[in-house]
Amino acid sequence: MAADARPRILVLNQYYWPGIEATAQLLAQLCEELAKEYEVTVVTGHLRGHDLPADEIRGGVRIVRVRSTTYERSELHRRAANYASYLGDTVLTALRGERPDLVLCMTDPPIIGDIALVVARRFGVPLLVISQDVFPEIAERVDRLRQPILLGALRRLVALYLKRADRVVAIGETMKLRLEEKGAPPDRVAVIPNWVDTAEIEPRPRQNDWSAAHELDDAFVVMHSGNIGHAQDLDTLVRAATFLRDLESLRIVLIGFGARHGEVTRLAQRLEVTRAVRFLGYQARELLPLSLASGDLHYVGLARGLSGFVVPSRLYGILAAGRPVLVSADADSETVRLVEEVGCGVVVPPGRPELVAGVIRDVVEGRRSLEGMGERGRDWVESEADREVAFGRYRRLVADVVGTGVSSSR
């Protein structure tokens, strides 16, 4: 590398801009920030419903899209096909490219870290892994994977790169413990929570153009905004509506899509709670500040047994909007610990719809106050989870890893 050339970072992850996945959006923001100091190339896949160029520059980042299938991902075998096609072409593309000074990857697909490890060792450079979830345990615990042989193989593959990566980022303290249990050396694991742009999402009036357009101005709105998948424990929220049929003003609004959207929709129909429970698709990014503001109380669920295996980062957007939260999760989860420490919401155990309903009823009928919770949450997210805070932590980490030079073989 010429003395005046910028260090190169090679980034591997199947999903990137313009994907709606949280990892796609977060990674794009991070890469564009790093591109201010580094030459950043992202090797990513194609997206369903998008006609995207194979090679383009956006936000100072070179985006290389390899050949990959774009099947709908709710069925496991179709998702596996997407993964396999992306991984196969990615390893060839990465190895044929220019020598980077750092290989960085997220965890989508879960074994992309093994490809990243091969590439990093081939060029003799450090590997930085940003863990957004802990696999395959999360798939096993939500009953998506059952085959013992496959689970065992996946555990070994994930452990392989966790043990050998030069640095691993966990997005929560509980996740850090999970990664260490899987073999990541404690001195190489850093905790950097995900982030939100507090300048983009800030407190807005509860009654606004978005709430008016969706006829929510006169309702008490309990909202879920984000993925409708296996980890979010949304059955509990829908079942809670069966205890609240007499609350005429109640609206439970589920915004988003995901692998369990159809199942959760059918559950609401079967329980005959569709008067109160409404489903809306993903909202355009520019509408997010208004849609989040339209919730009187936001529900953040995490299925039992998932503490530390996944961290619901949508919490940060809720707090940035200055709204209180109702958390249904295990006591040792990152979300529960944060909400209790900050005092920005109410916590109940997972899988207890009657308790969720009890909190909602108490708030609606005036026996429980949410006063001050939104303000405390906003104060916390500004100081701890704003994008500029997170980017500062990543800049220091990347500079340190790149500064170490050639990776040692472990």
Image (cartoon, rainbow, N blue to C red):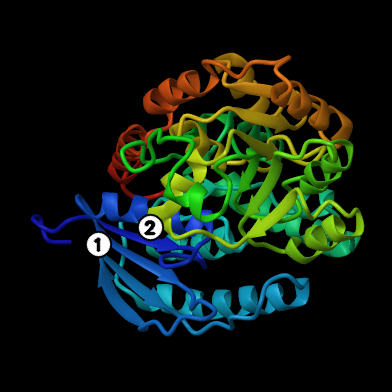
Nearer to us in this view, 117 or 220: 220
Crowd class of label 2 (few under 14; some 14 to 19; many from 20; radius 10 Å): many
Residue at image coords 42%, 68%: 18
Nearer to us in this view, 329 or 319: 319
First in residue order: circle 1 vs circle 2: 2
Residue at 49%, 33% in the rendered image? 190
Q: What's under tag 2, amino acid-wise?
A: Ala
Q: Is residue 408 visible?
A: no
Would you say the residues marked 1 and 2 are in contact, meaning their CB atoms lie under 8 Å apart? yes
Q: Residue 113 appears at what percent x and percent y?
A: 56, 58
Of helix, strand and loop, which one carries label 1?
Answer: loop
Identify whether 96 is placed above or below 143. below
The mark total stands at 2
* Mark seen at residue 76: none
Vertical placement of residue 236 versus 368, above or below: below
The answer to which of 163 and 333 lies nearer the viewer is 333
Q: Residue at x 28, y 42 (%)?
A: 403
User: What amino acid is labelled 1 in the image?
Assistant: Gly
Residue 363: x %, y % from top left: 70, 23
* Left/right of residue 152 with respect to residue 110 in the rendered view: right
Comparing 405 with 401, the one in front is 401
In-image side of 397 versus 61 (left or right): right
Instruction: Assign a secondary structure to mark 2.
Output: helix
Residue 80, relative to residue 146: is it above or below?
below
Place residue 315 in its image quadrant: top right
Q: Which residue is mark 1?
A: 59
**Percent position of residue 325, x then y:** 62, 30
The residue lying furthest to the left in this view is: 4
Residue 144 place in picture, x, y as percent: 82, 60
The residue sitting at 76% across, 73% down in the picture is 75
Residue 97 visible in this rendered orientation of the protein:
yes
Q: Which residue is mark 2?
A: 28
